[in-house]
Image (cartoon, rainbow, N blue to C red):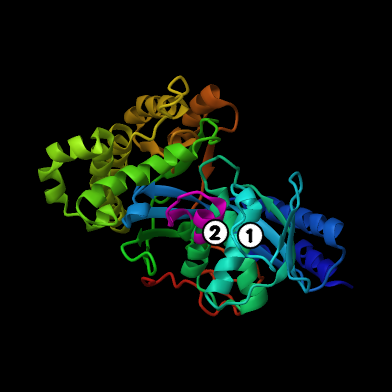
């Protein structure tokens, strides 16, 4: 019997049920994860045959709870891994080529003989794969070929960071197959950011990859980007009777890279006026003392976006402290303040080049109308300009809130999410509650800060 068939039998026999309960805290009942994994293995078998040494990997999507566009200024964010993920079945290959098959998408083939930046690949999954492999080699780790089948329920364009999950999954496969899990979760996140910035061509920060790679609900301080400080936090939200919801307004992220890029550019302009590389190094009082001059030299929007950084950076810290203390009322108040700062100062609610399309603005206005009566909080989610909002909804009001949002944006637009305690990981029956496993030598420890 092949390794692939043995793996299928273990899934059918319930050997992986404990791992599924860990990875999918809300949606593990009823056999759905097992069916999804079996479908993935069928895709693998169709593409690559029965195979031996087939291993399973998962990398979650993420939500950004606090710190909107603060990470690229070496600030603080509050983020969480969620119970949607990129799943992979992979096996090593001796031909020094990475070949990835995903049902419904074009195959990816990347030769590791050439790990230079390919301009014609920018914006493509191949660029991510090549960039992650290049980072591993650059850092002195091994990077070898593999064959993988991939499936994902982290919807592209949903604001849950499907790209970061794909990057973390690619790094996780490389880590397991060729490095005996010696690469830590923070470094795998850094590898993903490197690939996205240098190879894919998107000037993102590190928050998306960190939340996906580390897992759980985490406060992350990026003051030293080479060694971010990660603090694990208990959310207490479910115990307090609140659901975490995403509302997908169905706006397209296509052609919005320039809009995203203007935010770090304009914040950086203010930092440069003080001779600094990032706003985290600028004294807040000195900034406000020079606002009249900065308006002239940098422009009003740059000033406003810097104001947002100083506000939201502090709010992200306070949100984390409020959750850790179980003060949900204070936490929700802070989230609403954060949302107002993004709306008024960061101005990432809609694209200035297409003001007729303002799905996020509509969703925020409707949420305020609904949730201000029932309790809860709402704010733009992630990069902004199009896509999703985040809402914290009393569970007794969730059905009504979902009905209203789905009525405006389409059935299934409003989704309830759960925080997943485990980040990017090889999926093994013996996974422990902290996400560690016998093969993971440098996994993130949830009980202390990690640098």
**Pointers 2 and 1 in contact (C-beta within 8 Å):** yes
Which circle marks residue 195 in the picture?
2
Q: Is residue 384 magenta?
A: no
Q: Residue at x 55, y 30 (%)?
A: 250
How many C-alpha atoms fall within 10 Å of the one at disc 1: few (<14), some, or many (≥20)? many
User: Which quadrant does the C terminus fall into?
Assistant: bottom left
Q: Position of residue 234 (x, y in %)?
A: 38, 59
How many C-alpha atoms fall within 10 Å of the one at disc 2: few (<14), some, or many (≥20)? many
Depth check: 364 or 24 in front?
364
Q: Is residue 42 left or right of residue 97?
A: right
Compared with 242, 247 (above or below) is above
Q: Position of residue 15 (x, y in %)?
A: 72, 68
Q: Secondary structure at mark 2?
A: helix
Depth check: 435 or 182 in front?
182
Q: Is residue 241 left or right of residue 2?
A: left
Q: Residue at x 37, y 53 (%)?
A: 72
Q: Position of residue 442 (x, y in %)?
A: 51, 77
Residue farthest right in this picture: 1
Q: Residue at x 61, y 66 (%)?
A: 133
Q: Position of residue 429 (x, y in %)?
A: 66, 71
Q: In the rendered image, which residue does mark 1 sit on? A: 129
User: Which sits earlier in the primary sequence, circle 2 or circle 1?
Assistant: 1
Residue farthest left in this picture: 289
User: What span is in magenta?
Assistant: 194-208
Is most of the magenta stretch helix, strand or loop? helix
Q: Residue at x 50, y 49 (%)?
A: 202
Q: Is residue 212 visible?
A: no
Q: Is residue 195 magenta?
A: yes
């Amino acid at each position: 019997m092949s390794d692939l068939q043995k793996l299928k039998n273990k899934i059918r026999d319930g050997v992986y049920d404990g791992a599924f309960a860990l990875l999918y805290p809300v949606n593990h009942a009823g056999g759905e994860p097992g069916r999804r994994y079996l479908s993935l293995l069928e895709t693998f078998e169709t593409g690559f045959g029965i195979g031996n040494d087939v291993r399973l990997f998962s990398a979650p999507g993420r939500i950004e709870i606090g710190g909107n566009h603060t990470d690229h200024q070496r600030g603080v964010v509050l983020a969480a891994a969620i119970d949607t993920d990129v799943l992979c079945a992979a096996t090593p290959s001796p031909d020094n080529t990475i070949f990835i098959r995903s049902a419904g998408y074009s195959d990816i083939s990347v030769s590791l003989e050439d790990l230079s930046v390919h301009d014609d690949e920018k914006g493509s999954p191949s660029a991510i794969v090549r960039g992650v492999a290049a980072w591993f080699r650059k850092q002195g780790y091994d990077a070898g070929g593999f064959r993988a089948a991939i499936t994902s329920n982290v919807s592209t364009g949903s604001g849950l960071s499907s790209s970061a999950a794909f990057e973390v999954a690619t790094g996780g496969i490389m880590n397991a197959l060729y490095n005996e899990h010696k690469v830590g979760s923070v470094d795998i996140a850094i590898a993903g950011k490197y690939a996205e910035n240098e190879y894919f061509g998107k000037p993102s920060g590190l928050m998306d990859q960190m939340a996906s790679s580390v897992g759980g609900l985490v406060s992350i301080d990026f003051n030293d980007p080479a060694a971010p400080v990660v603090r694990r936090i208990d959310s207490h939200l479910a115990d307090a009777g609140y659901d975490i919801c995403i509302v997908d307004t169905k706006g397209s992220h296509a052609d919005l890279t320039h809009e995203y890029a203007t935010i770090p550019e304009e914040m950086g302009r203010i930092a440069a006026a003080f001779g600094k590389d990032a706003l985290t190094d600028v004294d807040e009082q000195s900034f406000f003392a020079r606002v009249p001059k900065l308006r002239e030299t940098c422009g009003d929007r740059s000033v406003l976006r810097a104001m947002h950084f100083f506000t939201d950076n502090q709010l992200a810290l306070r949100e984390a402290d409020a959750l850790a203390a179980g003060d949900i009322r204070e936490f929700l108040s802070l989230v609403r303040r954060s949302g107002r700062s993004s709306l008024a100062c960061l101005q990432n609610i809609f694209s200035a080049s297409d003001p007729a399309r303002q799905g996020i603005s509509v969703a925020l206005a409707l949420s305020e109308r609904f949730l201000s009566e029932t309790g809860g909080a709402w704010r733009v989610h992630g990069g902004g300009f199009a896509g999703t909002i985040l809402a914290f909804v009393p569970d007794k009001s969730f059905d009504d809130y979902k009905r209203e949002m789905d009525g405006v944006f389409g059935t299934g637009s409003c989704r309830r999410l759960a925080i997943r305690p485990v980040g990017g990981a090889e999926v093994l029956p013996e996974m422990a509650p902290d996400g560690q496993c016998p093969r993971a030598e440098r996994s993130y420890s949830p009980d202390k800060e990690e640098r």
